[in-house]
Image (cartoon, coloured by chain):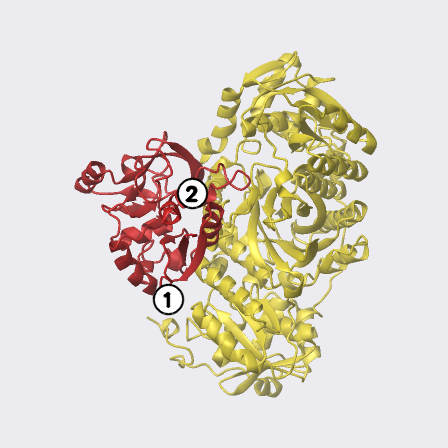
Amino acid sequence: MTSQDVTAGPGAPAAAPVPQDTVRAAAATPGRQQPFGALGLTADEYARIRAILGRRPTDAELAIYSVMWSEHCSYKSSRKYLRQFADKAPATDVLLAGIGQNAGVVDIGQGYAVTFKIESHNHPSYVEPYQGAATGVGGIVRDILAMGARPIAVMDSLRFGPADAPDTHRVLPGVVAGISFYGNCLGLPNIGGELGFDPCYLGNPLVNALCVGVLRHRDLKLAAATGPGNKVILFGSRTGPDGIGGASVLASASFGGAGEGAKRPSVQVGDPFMEKLLVECCLEVYQAGLVVGIQDLGAAGVACATTELSAGGGTGMRVRLDEVPLRDASLGPAEILMSESQERMMAIVTPANVGAFLATCAKWDVQATVIGEVTDTGRLEMTWRGDCVVQIPPGSAADDGPVYDRPVRRPGSLDAVTADDPARLPRPAHGEVLADLLLLVGSPDGGDKTWVTEQYDRYVRGDTVLATPHDAGLLRIDDATGLGVALATDGNGRYCYLDPYAGTQLALAEAYRNVAVTGARPLAVTNCLNFGSPEDPAVMWQFTEAVRGLADGCLQLGVPVTGGNVSFYNQTGSVPIRPTPVVGVLGVHDDVRRRVPSGFSAPGATIVLLGETRPEFGGSLWAWLRHAHLGGLPPVADLEAERSLADVLVAAATQRLVVAGHDLSDGGLALALAESCLTGGTGCTVELPGDPATFLFAESAARAVVAVRAGADVAFERLCAAHGVPATVLGRTGGVALQVAGCFAVSLAELAQAHRSALPALFG
Amino acid sequence: MTARVGVVTFPGSLDDRDACRAVRRAGGEPVELWHDDASLRGVDAVILPGGFSYGDYLRCGAIARFAPVMGEIIPAAARGLPVLGICNGFQILCEAHLLPGALTRNAARRFINRDVRIRIENAASPWTSGYQAGQELTVVLKSGEGAYMADPATLAQLEANGQILARYSGVNPNGSVAGIAGVVSAAGNVAGLMPHPEHAIDTLTGPTADGLGFFSSVLLPVARA
């Protein structure tokens, strides 16, 4: 056992003390070599830190800047473009807190507000699937908690390599089990998400976790350390050596190469039981009015919380790092600052309330320690063993990080791809479409997702009205009035590869449509932008197009972006993933008792196809699975048509005109009809008004299929006409088969066999 | 008068809120009980709800069994107080030896959240008196360690005494011995159930309203009193 392994109580000296670098020492030894490169800082960035401080940084200060100026925390490559979300924001009065806070907060009426956000945990989930995915859930839940909200549900958007690849069998079960373990143990229903497979994610899966919380307007909390003299309290788990440098090293560099082995210990370990206690403890101290400001500890841990709180409050802060409770007494100040130990929060509390705050923490068995005070110096000062080891302007680390204007270049090779029109692909004739339908229905992408979702608790808290496999998750917020919120996430790497601008608008449109299908009015947007390296000009082009598409789309649909997350460096070696912006849309449901489920559950309803179908196969699931083809252009993103369609869907739910509704997206009408029959357990008979392959497999956007309540046909037709939405009667629900006149009839039993065995056949 | 039904919150309890809602929906008055208070506040019955008490550290229910509130529940149960443990609550009752047997890891080694059909085998307990023996219900199973196990002698005794409260109907979802979904104590007042009746109290948020009977059953004696 070496001296580094000694574990003792807080404050115990390490066995072999190394002289600590102090502010005084830094001033006296300006020429000392510092390992800024290993910490992910460039020579220019290092020079800038020296300019800000007028001396070389101490080791502890270097640690702070390295994590705060990492791509993950500073958004240095994306910041220039993300401004569009504010600049182009639609006029709205629903936003109570917006971009820049831990999460956006949206007014949903009746005195309620909701806060929601999606965040990536891609790299940790590849290195250590179970803990990586688990702590992804934990991190986003604390973001929501930090706004003053009670977390009420989670969702996850997952993408893996080919379902039959050996490494997918290492990564997928671990990720799902990690999400299941953490979310279930925390008591948050998992109400939906996505699961997709593509070779581009084999060495870089996407694990994006979303959390939504609810609060009363008056309970809104901000990350600001105000009131000099107020106490800084660190509470939750002790600080250990886990995840040190995670943000700077893991999330901000690509996989591959010699460094990989050294990165392995950087994944944190989650304790959902502690997080559950932390949630209840926080809500109790909020309720009692004991908190002036609050911040969660995520990437960059204490460094991030102290700099952001003091920068947010426009104040200063004095922190005694010796007071931080440690799991490993050998940690020094730089490591304490960078540690990403989970389940920790930092609160600003008035001296008069410290006693009550600590008593509430004790009730919940949550360790809480006063580690410093708010000051009016405008400096963040930290001491260690009596010496000053940090003395910086907090805003220089939190807000004034470097902003890059990276080279942007549309890849010339894209022309050949978009010129490869899928119109040339042979399409199945009437008698052949069933084989293609079964291919889609039985594929890992189109198949039933129960193998995954059955591992998640969707019932806890008793307010889940709709969850997977319905189009959106729907939660009841108020028992008496039936007020609720709907949430959906969508993304499509194939569309975005062909045209990142249109592809991102299609992701937005799909999530918007999924929310509207349930009867909820879309209100606000969050996003998780998954891309390759920003140092690759072609990736930067994809990124800039995606952001422009999303900002323009949100303006046109009248739904503001409330916040989000950028995940760069998603690539294997020099090969980036396909650009995969994931868009989350939140909607308000006036009365969840009028929710519209996706399944056909009774015979005798008229099936109506809404929207216009065109022979659009570019990036479609059919072209990909049947012909391994990815070329041409994605479907047209007609956002005015999306808006009209949503108006019809929401009005139809309010007036109780429809008994089921399902959006059309990947897999087109074919997959939508199959899913509606299987989910509700009732078959249907339809007649297609044109080329069956086009009507079944094309992926034209702004479409949905609905089952109209018996007797409501005329009213529904009038509603569609009033909004200018094309409505085509296809047939009726009923029977125990899916029948397409002139093409095929397949029993629901056969359909179910193909659909339900897709994932179990691969994953057991 | 309205029956007062205590619902215990341990650190890590998750379905306490749902159990309270079910009691209220059935017409009772839920009373929140705190793990650290050695008091039952004069309730007419007690529910130990689902969740992961104390993070399921050591073994599910193994730590909760020593909570101060259990020091009150154990003697009260011996005096005949109706006690229902759901999921983690069932695990706690087994650890406290108020019920025989143990709950072990699901046969598939994965957490399962599924709507399941169960058959009421014993309709004489205070928690099932509103059902008919043989009646089938659809309720919610959601657990990672839900497979009921007991040694052959105990099992024979349970069968002989009519202590099997409910069995899974059709497919056995988790490998429970003899398809057992719930059991009752020899005296009949302490019941443990692995599936969650509190998640099946209306069709808006659950698969059915079949589970409401557990909560209305326990109110009957008080309503008659």
Sequence-earlier tag: 1 or 2: 1
Quarter of the figure with residue A589: top right
**Kind of residue sitting beneath label 1:** Asp
Question: Is residue A643 depicted above or below A565 in this figure?
Answer: above
Q: Chain B colour?
A: red
Question: Is residue A162 depicted above or below A32 in this figure?
Answer: above
Give the side of residue A715 with respect to residue A736, left or right.
right
Residue depicted at x 48% and y 45%: A456
Q: Chain A colour?
A: yellow
Mark 2 element type: helix
Residue depicted at x 37% and y 71%: A5
Q: Is residue A253 visible?
A: yes
Q: Residues within 10 Å of mark 1 (few under 14, many from 20)?
A: some
Chain hosting mark 2:
B
Find residue B30 and report its horizontal and vertical position in percent.
Answer: 45, 55
Find residue A535 and report its horizontal and vertical position in percent.
Answer: 69, 55
Give the side of residue B153 with respect to residue B80, left or right.
left
**Residue holding disc 1:** B37
Q: Nearer the viewer, residue A545 or A653?
A: A653
Give the side of residue A485 with respect to residue B40, left or right.
right
Q: Nearer the viewer, residue A257 or A348?
A: A348
**Residue holding disc 2:** B197
Q: Is residue A98 visible?
A: no
How far, Cα to Cα, is label 1 from label 2?
Answer: 26 Å
Q: Nearer the viewer, residue A317 or A538?
A: A317
Q: Are marks 1 and 2 on the same chain?
A: yes
